[in-house]
Every structure is written in C-alpha cells, then in structure tokens.
Amino acid sequence: MSILVYIENVEGNFKKSGFEALSYAKAIADTLQQEVYALSIGNVENTELEKAGKYGASKIINVQQEQLKNFVNQAYASIIADIAKSTGASTIILSNSFSGKGLAPRVATKLNAGLADAATSLPIIEGETWKIKKTVFSSKAIATIDLLSPLKVISLAPNAYEPSESPSDIQIENYTPKIEQSDFSTIIKEIVRATDKVSLPEADIVVSAGRGMKGPEHWGLVEELADVLGAATACSKPVSDAGWRPHEEHVGQTGLAVSPNLYIAIGISGAIQHLAGVSSSKTIVVINKDPEAPFFKVADYGIVGDAFEIVPQLIEALKRYKSN
Amino acid sequence: MKILVCISNVPDTTSKITFTDNNTAFNSNGIQYIINPYDELALSKAVELADGGKANVTVIHVGDVASEPTIRKALAVGADQAVRIDAPPRDAWFVANQIATYAKTENFDLILTGRESIDYNGAQVQAYIAELLQIPSVSIAKRIEINGNEATIDREIEGGKEVLTVNLPVVIGTAEGVAEVKIPNMRGIMGARSKPLTVLPAVDVPALSTISNYETPTPRGAVTLIDKDNINKLVELLHTEAKVI
Ligand SMILES: Cc1cc2nc3c(=O)[nH]c(=O)nc-3n(C[C@H](O)[C@H](O)[C@H](O)COP(=O)(O)OP(=O)(O)OC[C@H]3O[C@@H](n4cnc5c(N)ncnc54)[C@H](O)[C@@H]3O)c2cc1C
Ligand SMILES: Cc1cc2nc3c(=O)[nH]c(=O)nc-3n(C[C@H](O)[C@H](O)[C@H](O)COP(=O)(O)OP(=O)(O)OC[C@H]3O[C@@H](n4cnc5c(N)ncnc54)[C@H](O)[C@@H]3O)c2cc1C
C-alpha cells in the first residue's frame, strides 16, 4: 500500500506546502511501512520533480498536458482520484491551500473516503480509526477528528508541519490521463499574481497593522518592515473596510486565519475577532501605545509606545542585524 | 434564475467557546447565534441578483428547530422562501448530502455558500455539494458577475486572483468583495413572518468521520515587555529566544 501526495506548483515551481505535505506523508508512511508516491500536475521540469525525492517520495507521477497547465478543479480532482485508485493508495494527502480546499472534498467523495481538513497534527493511528487535530471556532479551540473510513483524505494546514529531508531515490513516471470534457467547464481568463510580494496564507512572518496607523499613506512603514523581514503584510478588518488595504489582507475571524512563525501587530487593539484568526501564530509581537490594549495579553513580546517612533527604529535594528 | 443560498447558524463572534460532556460536545449554553458572516455575503449577493423579481431565492439550512430565528432573518434580508432539513448538522459531508439531495429536485442555476463557516472552518461543503451534483464549483470567490448563462468569477489564490468563466449551474463560496451586506429593514422583517418555511426530513448518510474531543489552546506565558528605547533587545530575543529570525 502507498500514500499519495499531490504537490501544487506555481509556474513550474513546487510550493513549500507541497514539501510540508510530503514530509508529513513520509512520517505516516514510516509508521505504516508504506511507500510515498508524489503526484504533480502541470508543466514542471524534471529537476523540480526530482525534489520530491529529497522529502521521501520513491516515485513521482508526472501529469503534463497543455489543458492541465493551470488549475482546473474538476479535472485535477478526477486525476488525483484515478491515480489513487490505480496506485492502490490508502491515504491521499494534499495541502489545504485555496485550490486544495476545492479538491479535497471532491477527491474524498470520489473515493468514498473520510476527509480531515486543515489538519494540524500527525494522525494517532488506532487500527482503522485515525485521530487528527484541526483548529475550530476560528482558532478558539482544537478538535480531534476521527477518520473512520478505510480510505482517508487529509488536507494539511499550511505552516503546520515542518518539512524535513529524507532523501530517497526517485523514479519519474509520466502519465497521460483520460479526462472527460465535462471536467473542463471552468475557463481561466486571467491570472493576476503579485510576484514581488510574499503570499500571506503561506508566509513564515507576517507584519500586520491596524487603525493605529491612522491612514493608508503610512503603510510605507509597514511595507518596509515587511521587506526587511521577508514578511507578508496583513491588516485588521476596519483597515480593509475603509479601503486602506485590499480585502485579502484582512485577517481574523471573518478574514484569513494565519499561523506564521512570527506575527507582528502594529496599532491593533486585539479584539476577540482579530485574535481568533491570528492566535495560533507561534510568536506574537505587539506594538501599541496603549499599555492596556488587550493584544498584550496574548503576546510573547510587547513594546508600549508610538508606532511612528518604534517601527523606523525596528527597521534600522533589523537592517543592522541582517548585515551582521 | 433560481438561486439556492446555504445558511449556517454559528455562535456570535464574541462568544466564549467552551465544551461539555467531558469535552466531547460544544457548550451552547448562553450562546447567541448569528447567520455565518460569509453566508450573509452569499445571501446579499443573491438578493442583489434578484433585484426584486429577476431571480427566485431559496435559503436552505440543515439544523434543528432552534435555528429558525436565523432562517427568518435570512428571509427578512430578502430570500423568497426557506427550507430547513430537520437534523443536527453532524458534519460537512452530512450537510452537503442533505443540500445536494434537495437541490437535485429543484434545478437551481446558482448555489451559493459562504467561503467557510466560522465555527468548524471547513470550507468543504461547497465542493462536496458540487461533486455530489457533478457540477463545477469555486470555493472562494471575491467577485461574481452573472451574464445570461455565464458566470465570471474572481477566484482567490495565494497572492492574487484568477479570473474565470463558467456556465451555470455552479456552486460558489463567497468571500468579502462579492456584495455589500444587506441589513433587513422593517418591511423585510414583517414580511419574513409570512414567507414559506418548509421543513423536510434528512436522508441517511453513513458517517465517515466524527469529532471525538475538543480542547482549548494552551494559553501563552506572560508577555515580555521591551523598553521602547531598547529595540535591539527585541531583535536579539527574536533571534536567540524565539528563534524566528
Ligand atoms: C462580526 C464581526 C466580525 C469581525 N471580524 C473581524 C476580523 O476578522 N478581523 C478583525 O481585525 N476585526 C474584526 N472585527 C472587528 C473587531 O471587533 C475590531 O473592531 C477590530 O479588530 C479593531 O481593529 P483595530 O485594532 O485596527 O482598531 P482599533 O480597535 O481602533 O485599535 C487601534 C489600536 O491602535 C493603537 N494605536 C493608536 N495609535 C497608535 C500609535 N501611534 N502607535 C501605536 N499604537 C497606536 C490604539 O491604542 C488601539 O489599540 C469584527 C467585528 C465583528 C462585529
Ligand atoms: C450539535 C452540533 C454537533 C456538531 N458535531 C460535529 C461533528 O461531530 N463533526 C463535525 O465535523 N462537525 C460537527 N458540527 C459542525 C457542523 O456540522 C458544521 O456546520 C458542518 O460540519 C459544516 O461544516 P463546516 O462548518 O466546516 O462548513 P464549511 O464547509 O466551512 O461551510 C461552508 C458553507 O457551507 C454552508 N453550510 C455549512 N453548514 C451548513 C448548514 N448546517 N446548513 C446549510 N448550509 C451550511 C454555508 O454556506 C457555509 O458558509 C456540529 C454542529 C452542531 C450544531
């Protein structure tokens, strides 16, 4: 038996979340003494495909077809399910990315498998029952999901599992699937991607700012700090509601939930709805002029003071640190 | 055009989340329930598309009778009728099967959900419904435009968006940007009382998963305050102690 891992690529480069999923799969496969097979769909070069071997895959199935160059929800789901069947996979692992969220339920339905979505832990295996954790109530709680079905689909939350190398000889197997035309019902007109920016859902470091920044004209400071750290930028809800920043930067209970290694909150009070989406970050730094701001209660490090004085100093201090 | 809007009934965002029965069940004692905020966007978009008669909007909810105030609120916002599938919403697979079973009998052109519920945060129901109905879906949409039989959708992707077109019927999960949230007015609230709310029995669905335990995250230790005149200290701690830079 085997574990099948679908690895996403962006313009031919595998995403970090794919290596997280592979490492996660490898850990399970070692316990069960199974093989890890990777699956790539799209135009990915052999040198990139071979990288799956570094994280423990013994084979990568390479599906390369003009029609499949970009993500097509239904077609990709059909391919993943078909390959799961033909390779006899007992477990299918993918990333809980924006595309993954559309794939996992479809793959699970096709295979009559239970789905653990946004998994944050390795399974505890008790015979056919696998116990897997995920955050619920927007990070206010953690639930243990018991997967009861023989076949299992797991979509791994980004940043939840550290990729670790486990080199293995890898064989590349090219495969041409047969897909129904009805699986190509969505037609992509345009893909707009900010290439100069770190993507927020996957970022290791997030610099986030709130109403304390006073207005959109001050965001240069936030962006400069993010640049020095190689971080993504985020904001509180009122900031995106006011149009100071785009909606996709809004984090919290009704925005994106993020769990980076480092979350820096500048001029954000720390309302319960904001904390809901960020509190599972590993380290939290709060910069706020009000010592009573609720955010300090959930922070690891805090600086009380005016962001307009502190942030420029922090940028300088980080530049000095980076140049050493 | 016939639109189905899926409504989830969730704890108010300020709720303190606790559990009962030896941490195996959510403690709903004293909890105020609201329409899932993303579902409000879906509903608002549907009502906007209907624009007083251009489409017929049904809201559907899987849940017990206690959710009826939430359903009535959805009717007050402007849906034409409501359906409640009378069963506790056991999990996303169960909920999606109920909705798909109902949708099969009605031939909707558009099925809208929220991008995810703010309680179980699955973002699964939409793709499950679409797969069960064998129709296309977009899990997270930031813009929806309908032109005749074609929808143009901005799908959220990491670090950007993808603009795509698809023929109806389609299932779409809505995120911020698709519509302005509509607040019910007095006329809507009065009218909602007499709009049809049909209660249907649930179909049997074998369970593929179950939640066996809940816990609350371990609280962080006390904050380390750093003097604003000693910013270097923060950089040092982030490097040596937190090991994040
Ligand atoms: C249903 C619902 C859902 C919601 N969902 C979300 C959500 O998903 N995400 C979210 O963020 N919010 C959400 N909110 C809003 C939330 O309740 C708060 O209103 C919001 O988070 C506050 O944003 P803020 O911290 O930027 O602004 P404020 O609360 O106004 O805080 C500004 C902070 O900046 C500090 N400050 C001011 N000037 C300076 C300075 N010069 N230097 C340093 N600090 C300074 C102040 O001390 C203050 O703490 C939701 C609310 C509701 C009702
Ligand atoms: C008493 C109780 C017990 C529960 N026990 C479990 C459990 O053991 N395991 C478990 O996984 N979940 C459990 N749930 C959660 C509940 O079943 C979830 O609402 C359901 O799993 C949907 O999944 P989700 O919240 O992840 O939805 P998502 O996939 O995040 O929801 C996406 C969209 O689907 C639609 N939708 C979601 N739920 C409904 C609904 N009920 N009716 C109509 N449309 C809806 C909404 O438009 C929503 O925006 C329980 C809920 C209750 C009230």
Image (tube, rainbow, N blue to C red):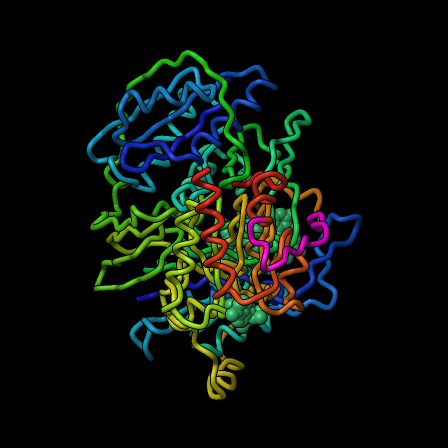
Find the magenta span and give its range.
B217-232
Residue A146: give x, y in percent of width and height.
Answer: 64, 37
Is B230 included in the stretch rendered in magenta?
Answer: yes
Q: Quadrant of ligand 2?
A: bottom right
**Residue in the image at 60% along x and 31% along y:** A122
Inspect this view and state whether residue B36 appears: no
Is B28 included in the stretch rendered in magenta?
Answer: no
Residue A260: give x, y in percent of width and height.
Answer: 52, 45
A72 and B54: which is toward the camera: A72
Quarter of the rendering containing residue A47: top left
Inspect this view and state whether residue A267 appears: yes
**Residue in the image at 51% along x and 53% along y:** A257
Q: Quadrant of the N terminus of chain B?
A: bottom left
A78 and A324: which is toward the camera: A324
Q: Does residue A122 sit above or below A31 in this rendering? A: below
Q: Does residue B107 sit above or below A111 in this rendering? A: below
Residue A211: give x, y in percent of width and height.
Answer: 49, 70
Q: Main structural element of the magenta stretch: helix, strand or loop? A: loop
